[in-house]
Amino acid sequence: MAHLKSPARRIIAATTSAVVALGLVSCSTSTDQEGATGAAEVTADGASTSEVVDNSPYREARAENVARVVSEDFPDSPTVISDTGYSGVKTSELFFDDSDIVVVSGAGIAEELRAASIGVVAHAPVLHAPGGNDAEVTAEIERLGASTVLLVGSALPDLAENDVITKIIHDNGTEEGLAQLTALQFETKEVETVADVVRETSTLTPDEQTLLVPSWGGVKASSTDEKLDAFPLQSKRDGEMSPIVLASPESGISAVATARAYGAEVRFMDYPDPRFNQDQMKMVAGLADKPLLALGDQFGTGEQLAAKIKRGEEVTTELPGGGGLVFPGRRMVALYGHPSGPALGAMGEQPAAEAVVRATDLANQYQQFEDQPVIPAFEVIATVASASPGDDGNYSNEFPVEDLVEYVDAITDAGGYAVLDLQPGRASFLEQAKLYEELLKRPNVGLALDPEWKIGPDELPMTRVGSSDASEINEVSQWLADLVAENKLPQKAFVLHQFQMQMLGNRDQINTDHLELAFVLHADGHGSPGDKYATWNMLREGLSPDFFMAWKNFYDEDFPTFTPQQTYEEVDPRPWFVSYQ
C-alpha cells in the first residue's frame, strides 16, 4: 500500500477566520476601507462597541476558503507548479510521495483523456510521455516506486520490467479493455472542443467512473483479442487536507488528473487571473497568504498570483462588461480623434453625445461576431504634435483637461472606455502623462503612447517617423502602475502605437510585469489588406505574449476599409481593441 502524506495539519484558528471574514477592528474609527461601512466606538476601557461591516462580495467565500484545513506537507502560500511539456511530473512529485501504480499516456489528447479518466478512478498519478521526455517520465516512475504501470497509447515504448516495475500493462483502447482493467463500468462523456478538455478533466471524480472521449475521435483500438490484466486500484488519499488547486485552459491534462486522483479540489478558471470576474475571485478570496496551488506557468509566479488575489479583494470596482481586467472579458471598438473637430480623426466629427451614439453603433455591429461584451470607446488625443515649437519649444500642444472632459464623460457615462493619446514631440511621455493625472485617476480611462510623434531634441515633426526606447516606456508604465495601485483602481489599458519596428526601440525590454496594467500593442498600418496584414504579422514577431493586439481601420487611407466582420473573422488573432480614424 502506498505511503500517505503526513496527517500533520495547518489549522486556521476560528478566531483568526472570524477576524478575516468579518473585518473586525478594535482600535480604529476609520471608515474608508474598501467594501466596508460603519465605525467602531471605543469605550474608556478600550473595548470596541461595534464592528466594521464587511460588504465585500467575497466575504462568505473568504470565510470558507481560509477555514480550510491543509496538511503541512504542502507549501504555505500560493505556489505555481510548472508543467513544461505537460508531463505532469512536477504535480506528481508534489502530491505523491510514492505510489504502487501509475498511468502514462502517449501523444494525443484522446490518449491523455483516457489515461486521466482511469488514473482518477484508480487514485494513481497520471503522466504524459508523448516522446522527447521519456527519461523524465521514467525517472518519476522510479521515484514513485511504482510496481505496476499502465501505458495508454504509444507511451514509453522502451520501458521494461525490472526489480521495481514488475508489471507493464498495455491498454488496448477498447471498452472491453477498460472493463478488464478496472472491473468497473465507465460512462462515456464526449468533450466537444479542445478548449473544454481541461475543464472536463477537472470535474472527474473517483466515485463516478467517467471516460472522457474527444468528439473528434478517440483512442485507436488495438486489434489484439488478448485479455488485459487487472490494473490495481489504490485507496483514497487524504485529499480533503490538500490546498485548493487552480487550473485554466492552458493547464496540463495529466497534472489536473493527478491532483484529482489525490482527491484535491480543482477549481477551473476561464482565464489564469482571478480578477477576471467575481466568480473567479471567490475561488481564491482570502488565500493571498494561504496554501493555494496553481497548475501551469500561465498563472505567473506564486508571488504574482498572491498579489493579484490581494489586489482583487481590495479593488471591487468592475470595468464596463464586468470583471477587474481590461482584457480579456470584453473587447472595445473606438473612435479616434480630438474634440476640436474632424481634422484629427473620426471622434471629433460630431459633438460628444453624437460620437457616443456612433461608437455604440459600431460596437453593436461587432457584437454579432463575438461572445464577449463589445463596448464603445474613445481614443482621445490629449497632446497633438505641432509643426511649430510653441511657447515651451517642445513641438507639441498639450490641451487642458477641461477641453477633453466632455468626451471622456460622455463615453464613460454611457458604459464605455476612454483612452488618452499622447503625441509628445520633443517632450517626454512621462511629463505629458502627468498633466492628465486627474483623468487617469478615473477607473475607465487608460493611456496610449504614440512614438510616431516622439522626436529628438534637434528634430522636427514630419521629418521622420519618431521612436521611443523601452526605457522611456518603462518609466511611464511604472508611474501609471503606481497611480493605479495607490488609488485602488481596476486594471488600466496601457496602449503602445506601432507600425514600424524602429518605433519601439529595444521592444523586448519593455517591462510587462505590472499587474495593474493591460499592455496593448496597437498596429497602425494602413493601405491595402495585404499591406495591413504584412504590418500586423511583422509587429507580432517576437512580441511578448503579455501584449493584447489592437487594430486600426482608416476611413480614408485604407482601400477598402475593413468591415466589422472582416476585422473580427479575417484578422488573426482577433484584435481586442479596434479604433477608427
Image (cartoon, rainbow, N blue to C red):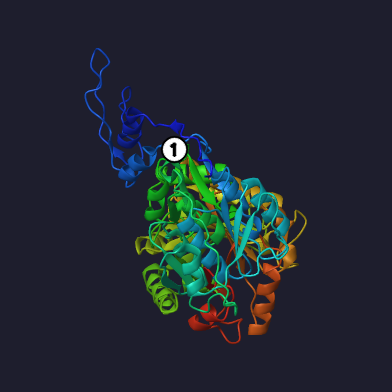
Residue 109 lies, with reference to residue 458, above or below; the image says: below
Residue 554 in the figure: left or right of residue 471? left
x then y, percent, for residue 184:
42, 64
Which sits in the foreground, 289 or 440? 289
Disc 1, SS = strand
Q: Quadrant of residue 138?
A: bottom right
Residue 301 position in % (x across, y down): 59, 46
Q: Amino acid at mark 1?
A: Val
Above or below for 86 versus 370: above
Residue at the spot of label 1 = 70
Kindly give the residue lying farthest to the top in the view shown: 45
The quarter of the image holding the C terminus is bottom right
On the image, the x and y values in percent for residue 538 come to: 71, 71
Q: Residues within 10 Å of mark 1 (few under 14, many from 20)?
A: many
Residue at 61% over, 49% down: 90
The foreground one among 467 and 340 is 467
Residue 399 shows in this picture:
no
Please, is residue 198 above or below residue 510 in the view?
below
How far from the left and from the top, in percent, is residue 193? 49, 74
Name which quarter of the figure residue 479 lies in.
Answer: top right
Front in this rendered view, residue 502 or 10: 10
Who's the residue at 48% across and 51% down the image?
234
- Total labels: the figure holds 1
Q: Nearer the viewer, residue 88 or 348?
A: 88
